[in-house]
Image: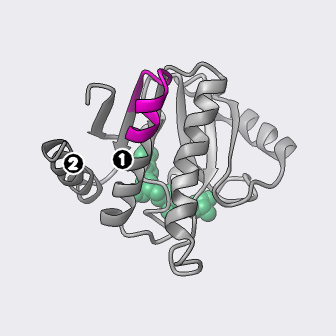
Amino acid sequence: MERISIRMGDITTVEVDAIVNAANSTLLGGAGVDGMIHWAAGSGLLEECRSIGWCPTGEARITAGYNLPARYVIHTVGPVYGVDRENAPRLLASCYENCLSLAVQHTIRTLAFPAISCGAYGYPVEEACKIALDTTISFLERNEIPEKVFFVLYSCRDYNAYWEYYATKMANG
Ligand code: AR6
C-alpha cells in the first residue's frame, strides 16, 4: 500500500505534519521515545502537556510540536502488557484509532508512529505490529486523511518484525 511506509530511524527528526508519542497517563514525560521527544521539542511541550492533565490508556491528546520539525505531537498511552493482558490488544488498537482520528480532525496529512508499548510497556513487537498495521490500514481504507503514515522503528528487531508482517499481509491481499 503506497500510503504506508516502514523505516528505521529516530522519530524526533522526521519531517511530517505530526509525530506520535508513546507517553504515560501523566503526559509529563518519561524515558524512551517520550523522553527524546520532550528533549527535542523543548520546555514548551511540557507546559502544554501539564495544562492538558491526565490521559487514560488507549486515548490520545494533541499538542504543538515546538522545536520539532513536526507541527504537532499526538500523545497516546499504550497498555502495559503484563498488567492488562486481556484488554491489551483492544487498548493498543484504540491508541492507533484515536491518533488517526485526531489526524483527520486537524487535517494532518503525514503522520509518524513509533512502536507504541513495545519498550518499557513490554508489548511483544511481533504482536503489536499486527495491531498497528491492521488498525492503520483499515482506517486508511475508510479515510482520505492522513495521506501517508510512517512507522518509524528505532531497532532492527522492530523494523524486521514490521516488515515481515507487512509483506505477508500484502502478499495475502
Ligand atoms: N524514535 C522512534 N522510536 C523510538 C525512539 C525514537 N527516538 N526511542 C525509542 N523508540 P518506549 P512504551 C522506540 O519505552 O513501551 C516512557 O517512559 C523503542 O525502541 O519509548 O510505550 C513513557 O513515559 C520502542 O520500540 O514506550 C511511558 O512511561 C518504542 O519506541 C513508557 O515509557 C516504545 O518504547 C511508555 O512505554
Q: Secondary structure at mark 1?
A: helix
Q: Are marks 2 and 1 in contact (CB under 8 Å)?
A: yes
Crowd rating for badge 2 (residues with CA inside 10 Å; few <14, some 14–19, many 20+):
few
Out of 46 and 170, give the one closest to the viewer: 170
Circle 1 residue: 133
User: From mark 2 to mark 1, how far is it between C-alphas?
Assistant: 9 Å
Label disc, if present, on residue 169 of the rendered structure: 2
Where residue 41 appears, as percent x and y from the top left, is 62, 34
Compared to 71, does 102 lie above or below? below
Compared to 85, does 7 lie above or below? above
Where residue 60 appears, as percent x and y from the top left, is 67, 46
Q: Secondary structure at mark 2?
A: helix
The amino acid type, in three-letter code, at marker 1 is: Leu
The amino acid type, in three-letter code, at marker 2 is: Lys
Out of 10 and 90, give the one closest to the viewer: 90
- Residue 10 shows in this picture: no
**Which span is picked out in magenta?**
137-149
